[in-house]
Image: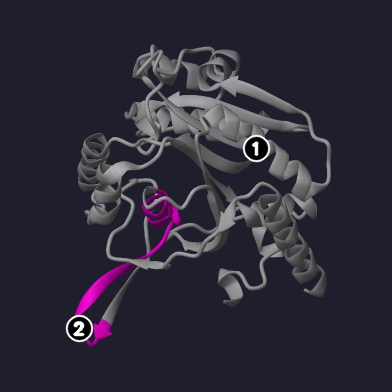
Amino acid sequence: MPDRLRARAQLLRRVRRFFDGRGVMEVCTPVLSRAAGTDPAIEPLRTCYTGPEYPGGLDLYLQTSPEFPMKRLLAEGSGPIYQLAQVFRDGEYGLRHNPEFTLLEWYRPGFDHHQLMDEVADLVRACLGEPLEVEKFTYVDLFLEHIGVHPLDADVAELLAAAEQLGLVVEGVTDRNEWLDLFMSLVIEPRLGRDRLTFVHDYPASQASLARLNPGDSRFASRFELYFRGVELANGFHELTDAAEQRRRFEEENRQREKKGQRLLPLDENLLAALEAGLPDCAGVALGLDRLLMLSLNASCLDDVLSFSLKNA
C-alpha cells in the first residue's frame, strides 16, 4: 500500500509540474450536477438532495467527466485549463474499470486535435520517464488492415462475414456501431501501442457526439484515442462549438437511450447556453490517470493501484 500511494503522489506532482511549465491553470468544478451526459455507452450514478430550498428533493448526478463545467469556464474566458477529477460511472468494474476513478482532463484554446495529440504524447513521456516513440493511424486504416473492410462502406452482412472469417462468434448484433465497437475492442485494440504510443484518429461521426466533423468527410469526426500496451489511455476531440448542433446530438442520444430501455437524461442547459454565448475554438482530452499509473508500475489490473477499489470501498 505505501508504495502505490507514493507512486500516485509522484505522478500527480509530475502532472502539475508539466502543466505549470506550459501555463495551463488547474481548476476544480462540482462533482454533482442537475444534468448528465446522454451518451448511451456511459451510465451516470444518481443521488438526491433533500434540504433547504428543495424539501421535495432534487435529483443530482455524479459527474462522469468534468467536461461540461470546464467548457463553461472556457466560455467565460478562463484560457487553457486542466483538472484532476474524481468521476463516477455506473456498471463499470473489471481489470481496467472501477465505478470511481481519477480522470485528468484538459482544454487548449487554439489547438486542433492533432496539436493536442502531440501534447498528450509529451505529457505521457514526462509522467512515465520514457522517450517513447509515437505512431498515428486513422480509424479507417486500422479497419482495412486488421478487419479487411471499410468501417462505413461495408454493410452489416459484410461485417458479419468479416467476423466469421476472424473466428469471432457473436450473436444478436445488428447495429453497425456495435459491430465496429466489437471489432475495435476484440481485434484491434490489443494490437495497439505494444512498444510505443499509438494514436487512432478520425472516428466515425456516430461515435463522437462532442467533436466537430471532419471538414474533408463529414462521415468522420475530429476525435482521437491514445493506446499504450493495448490499453486505452485517452480520448480527445477538436471540440464542437455549435450549440444547435450539440442540442440535436444530445436529443438523438436520448432517443437511442429510449430504444435501448435506458432512462432519459436531462440535457445540460448551462453547457448549451455557454456554447451559445461562445466557446472558443479548442481541443480537449480526458486521460485515465489510474490506468497510466497501472502501466507505470507494470500492474496487472486497476485494483492494484487504487487506495480502495469497489471491493473494499
Look at label 2 and name its amino acid: Glu
Residue 200 or residue 143, whichever sits in front = 200
Q: Earlier in the sequence, mark 2 or mark 1?
A: 2
Q: Which residue is mark 2?
A: 53
Q: Is residue 119 magenta?
A: no
Q: Which residues are magenta?
A: 50-74
- The dot on residue 119 is 1
Are the residues at dot 2 and dot 1 in contact (C-beta closer than 8 Å)?
no
Residue 191 or residue 46, whichever sits in front = 46
The C terminus lies in quadrant: bottom right
Label 1: state its secondary structure: helix
Q: Is residue 62 magenta?
A: yes
* Residue 290 % position (x, y): 65, 57
Q: What crowding class fits label 2: few (fewer than 14 Cα within 10 Å), some (14-19), or many (20 or more)?
A: few
Label 2: state its secondary structure: loop
Q: Is residue 305 left or right of residue 170?
A: right
- The answer to whether residue 163 is above or below residue 261 is above
Q: Is residue 166 left or right of residue 68?
A: right
Query: Residue visible at 69% across and 24% down?
Result: 135
Look at label 1 and name its amino acid: Glu
Choose top left, top right, bottom left or bottom right for residue 220: top left
Residue 50 or residue 117, whichever sits in front = 117
**3D distance between C-alphas at marks 2 and 1:** 44 Å
* Residue 32 % position (x, y): 37, 68
* Residue 41 % position (x, y): 38, 46
